[in-house]
Image (tube, rainbow, N blue to C red):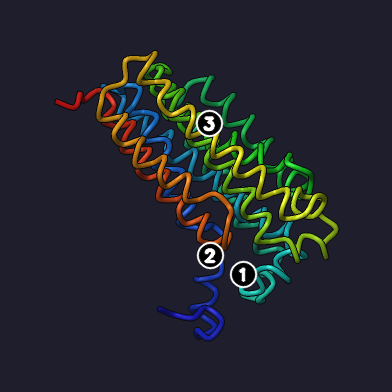
């Protein structure tokens, strides 16, 4: 793997903008839109689904780049290898990348509905508010990111209609993201404190943050059987969510936050699979 900091200058100019877009996050956004469309039973609207995916990914890219610009003081401590503190891209270049991605998102909106445009505009406002204010405030930023992740499924489902499965999937994704964002605050405690941020981990300490993360995860596990009991989800859903619940419980903060964050990622994968095949009974 190429170390961006030691790569030739010409390659660094390519790697820097690519890094600020956070390709893994873009893949997750695309998957969320696809999942929402799939769970809604989307048929005959493949082009709309594709444009929705492009618009959502472009908006996420714009928000990611703008976040790097907003968080320079924190990243200088927590993530000094990020492109901006490492000098692989300039602040102006970062804003150009963000603005270009946002324009691409607006262009992708043109074939879509007014409801798509309204949700896109609302999410753009939340992203801006998060980057400039929410990421440094007690729980506000965590809730904003959770809402944004959940909304990607609604964005994908708008063409065909939002179903029970879409609502359940969006709620699951939002709750898991909320826990993961609070874990990240524990990981970023030092840089956030030096930057004057007022996250829960800074204000109340990592122990209180850990207890709240555990509460969210316990509530999420407790809620996983409800769609099987009340919404006619199949036995495959229950089996998949049983595996997911084990991962969620193991992700409770009793050790290294990085381990908990990784387990949450896997729980989101198994939970997604459980929702995709929720109609299949176990015989």
Quadrant position of the N terminus in the picture: bottom left
Disc 3 to disc 1, how far (Cα)?
27 Å
Q: Mark 2 — residue?
A: 19
Disc 3 to disc 2, how far (Cα)?
24 Å
Q: Is residue 153 left or right of residue 208?
A: left
Q: Is residue 227 left or right of residue 253?
A: left
Tell me residue 4's x, y (percent).
52, 78
Which residue is at 44% across, 25% downward? 168
Tell me residue 268's x, y (percent).
42, 43
Which residue is at 43% across, 21% downward? 226
Residue 110 seen in this snapshot: no
Where 209 falls versus 277 (above or below)?
A: below
Residue 75 seen in this snapshot: yes
Tag on residue 151?
3
Q: Do the residues labelled 3 and 2 touch (CB within 8 Å)?
A: no
SS for dot 2: helix
Q: Mark 1, residues whose alpha carbon is within 10 Å: few (<14), some, or many (≥20)?
A: many
SS for dot 1: loop
Tag on residue 204?
none
Tag on residue 82?
1
Quadrant position of the C terminus in the picture: top left
N-term mark: 1 or 2: 2
Where 116 falls versus 24 (above or below)?
A: above
Q: Mark 3, residues whose alpha carbon is within 10 Å: few (<14), some, or many (≥20)?
A: many
Specify the farthest residue to the front. 254
Q: In this view, does 39 lie to the left or right of 17?
A: left
């Amino acid at each position: 793997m190429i170390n961006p900091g030691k790569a030739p200058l010409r390659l660094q100019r390519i790697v820097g903008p690519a890094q600020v877009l956070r390709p893994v996050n873009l893949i997750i956004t695309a998957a969320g839109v696809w999942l929402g469309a799939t769970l809604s039973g989307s048929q005959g609207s493949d082009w709309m689904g594709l444009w929705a995916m492009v618009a959502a990914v472009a908006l996420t890219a714009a928000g990611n780049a703008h976040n790097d610009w907003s968080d320079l003081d924190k990243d200088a401590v927590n993530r000094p290898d990020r492109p901006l503190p490492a000098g692989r891209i300039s602040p102006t270049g970062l804003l150009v990348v963000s603005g270009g991605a946002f324009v691409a998102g607006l262009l992708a909106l043109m074939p879509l509905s007014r409801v798509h445009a309204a949700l896109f505009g609302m999410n753009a406002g939340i992203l801006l508010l998060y980057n400039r204010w929410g990421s440094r405030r007690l729980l506000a930023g965590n809730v904003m990111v959770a809402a944004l992740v959940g909304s990607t499924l609604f964005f994908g489902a708008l063409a065909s209609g939002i179903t029970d499965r879409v609502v359940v999937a969006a709620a699951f994704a939002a709750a898991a993201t909320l826990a993961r964002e609070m874990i990240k605050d524990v990981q970023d405690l030092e840089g956030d404190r030096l930057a004057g941020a007022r996250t829960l981990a800074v204000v109340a300490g990592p122990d209180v943050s850990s207890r709240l993360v555990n509460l969210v995860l316990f509530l999420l596990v407790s809620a996983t059987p409800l769609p099987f009991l009340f919404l006619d989800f199949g036995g495959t859903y229950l089996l998949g969510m049983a595996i997911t619940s084990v991962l969620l419980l193991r992700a409770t903060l009793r050790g290294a936050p990085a381990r908990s964050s990784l387990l949450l990622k896997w729980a989101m994968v198994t939970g997604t699979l459980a929702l995709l095949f929720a109609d299949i009974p176990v015989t």
